[in-house]
Amino acid sequence: MVLWLVVLVVAGLFGAAGLTLWQTRRIEAENPPVGRFFAVGPDGGARLHLVDLHPPAVPSGTDTDTDAEQKPVVLLLHGANVHLADMRVALGDRLAQTLRVIVPDRPGQGWSDAGGAVVSDPGHQVAMIRAAVEALGVRRLVVVGHSLGGLIALRYALEAPESVAGLVLIAPTTHPRPGGLPWFQRFAEVVIGPLMTRTVLLPLSLATLKPMVARLFRPESPPENYAAATGLTLGLTPRRFLASLADYSDLRDHLVAMAPRYPDIDLPTVLVVGEADEVVPPAIHADMLAEVLRHRKIVRFPGAGHMLHHTRAAPIAAEILRLVDEVTPPAG
């Protein structure tokens, strides 16, 4: 009896793995790369995928053309379990009406390679992204990060302060939760997670996609076409989700190491928080960061949840534009 049960479980896992492989190929075909690839990493053996958005063309030599050249470029960094389309749909295309905007797939996500076993290390992610940005000839940035992308934005400012003119951090992940993760959650991420990811996670996630999206946005309602517009399912495929598992399991250690360095950041910073955010509560993240930054502005949205870059896109874009103007050197 026990033997037959084992056989049935193994057969079920093999069947789920085959279904996951088929669904992954279909999802990747529906969400192909839309930008450019750059060889990055210490030996150039990894590829980073990004889109480079430019404002509508203006006549060369005009005042508008000169102003655009002086303005810093906006770098948009997405959060966990998504790829560049999440930030492009929310803010990228809107900002690109007047600014140059770069939106990468963070290492391990979308169509970017992990670049090695250290994909969860914020320093590693910054090095890969920075190599691609500099290959584009960009030397001055306003870095915008959502959620886990906010942590990468902070690390970018610490690693390359000469390249960063300002920061906009939207619901940023900044500090370790008091008490840490329960042991069983860490066990599930490290041991059970990889097996589930390669077998049943994708089919189950696709079957429960609507409530999953609702949890991301609560207490607010998500846009009707959010999952389709952002290619959300790409982040649920095994290779990308395994990179997300590494992000989650290693996150606390990286936060503990980085938090003491935040006072070194001497840049104009805008903190944007949703006061009803249950995913990254501002009381133990953005509010604590605000206490140690010298040049910061806090923008609070009552009733807003974690995905406020979608639900409050217009006012957030206005804050980014205001900061860009603030850090742009005067003509002449």
Image (cartoon, rainbow, N blue to C red):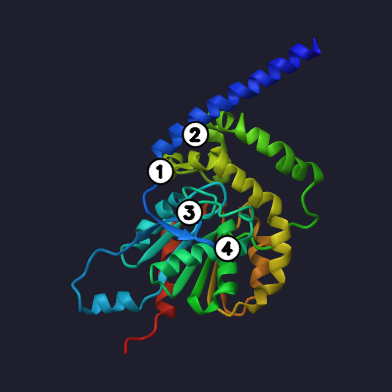
Residue occupying the far bottom of the picture: 332
The location of residue 329, given as percent across then percent down, is 39, 84
Identify the amino acid type marked 4: Ile
Question: Quadrant of residue 293 in the image?
Answer: bottom right
As helix, strand or loop, the secondary structure at mark 3 comes to loop
The location of residue 303, given as percent across then percent down, is 56, 53
Identify the amino acid type marked 3: Asp
The answer to whether residue 15 is above or below residue 151 is above
The 10 Å Cα crowd at callout 1, few under 14, some 14 to 19, many 20 or more, is some
Q: Which residue is mark 2?
A: 24
The location of residue 155, given as percent across then percent down, is 60, 68
Q: What distance separates the C-alpha of mark 4 from that of mark 2?
A: 27 Å
Q: Which residue is mark 4?
A: 152
The answer to whether residue 74 is above or below residue 51 is below
The 10 Å Cα crowd at callout 3, few under 14, some 14 to 19, many 20 or more, is many
First reached walking from the N terminus: tag 4 or tag 2: 2
